[in-house]
Image (spheres, helix red, strand yellow):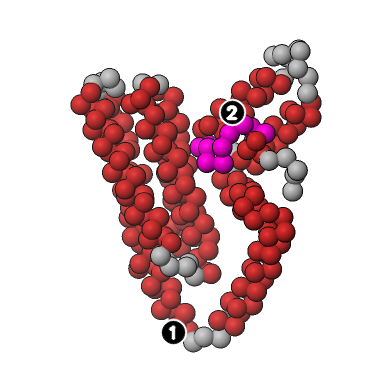
Amino acid sequence: MSNFNHYETLKVSNHASQAEIKQAYRRLVKIFHPDSNQDITDNEQIIRVNAAYEVLSDSKSRFDYDEKLRHGQEKFHHVRQKRAESAQQDYKAARKTRKDIDENIEEWLRLVYKPVNRILSTILNSLEAQIEELAADPFDDDLLDEFQDYLASCREDLKDAQIKFRSLPNPASFAPAAAHIYYCMSQVGDGIEELAYFPLSYDHRYLHTGQELFRIAKRLYREAQESVS
């Protein structure tokens, strides 16, 4: 693990959105690039900035990195040991009857996967219509109020999905689907926050970034469904 904190390298907080991370990276590259600023030639700093962005720009690698930051190197090894112990427990649990295992899977699908899927589908498939309505006059106060109400509703729905997702541990056989759902919800949350900046600034870049995050979320949503089918 690097001695440098990637968030500190990019000068962003641990809770920064993907858009903020990208913006910080571009700003630093411009500062430290010799073609842009000949007075500053810190190749080591450029290498650190690139390494930080490579980790933080990808949702999966960022999640793993955050885990390491939270627990530290020593605790990270402890987590690995716990995972090994968990694997042993899973092996012992495999001795359970087929009926019990099927019941656990059915419960997770019924109480977690299906309701969370319905909520995410509603959020992801509703954005296009909202953007079209707003496009009629992006500066109209009534349309902006409706857009903000829509985003507030999405936040509440997403919160409900996150609570349901955490309500039961996913069966081991559905770990890939659960991971896709987790990252899908993360992208949706970032997308909502990006879209929420538009009524405050009228900067269309926030709309474009929010839509792009929703497109990524849709891909993850489809991958989750493919993992289950």
Q: Magenta stretch: dominant SS? A: loop
- What type is the residue that disc 1 sits on? Lys
The residue beneath circle 1 is 99
Query: Residue 83: horizontal and vertical position, in percent?
Result: 64, 68
Magenta stretch: includes residue 143: no
In the rendered view, does 151 fall on the left or right side of 65? left
The residue beneath circle 2 is 24
Say what secondary structure mark 1 lies in: helix
Query: Residue 151: horizontal and vertical position, in percent?
Result: 31, 38
Q: CA distance from mark 2 to mark 1?
A: 52 Å
Q: Nearer the viewer, mark 2 or mark 1?
A: 2
- When asked about the image quadrant of residue 7, the answer is top right
Nearest to the observer: residue 74 or residue 165: 74
User: Alpha-carbon neighbours of circle 2 within 10 Å: few (<14), some, or many (≥20)?
Assistant: many
Residue 25 showing in the rendered view: yes
Magenta stretch: includes residue 11: yes
C-beta proximity under 8 Å, tags 2 and 1: no
What segment carries the magenta color? 9-18
Q: Is residue 184 above or below residue 92?
A: above
In the rendered view, does 87 fall on the left or right side of 43? left
Nearest to the observer: residue 198 or residue 40: 40
Residue at image position (34%, 54%) is 160
Residue 54 showing in the rendered view: no
Residue at image position (74%, 48%) is 1
- What type is the residue that disc 2 sits on? Ala
Q: Is residue 16 above or below residue 219?
A: above
Q: Earlier in the sequence, mark 2 or mark 1?
A: 2
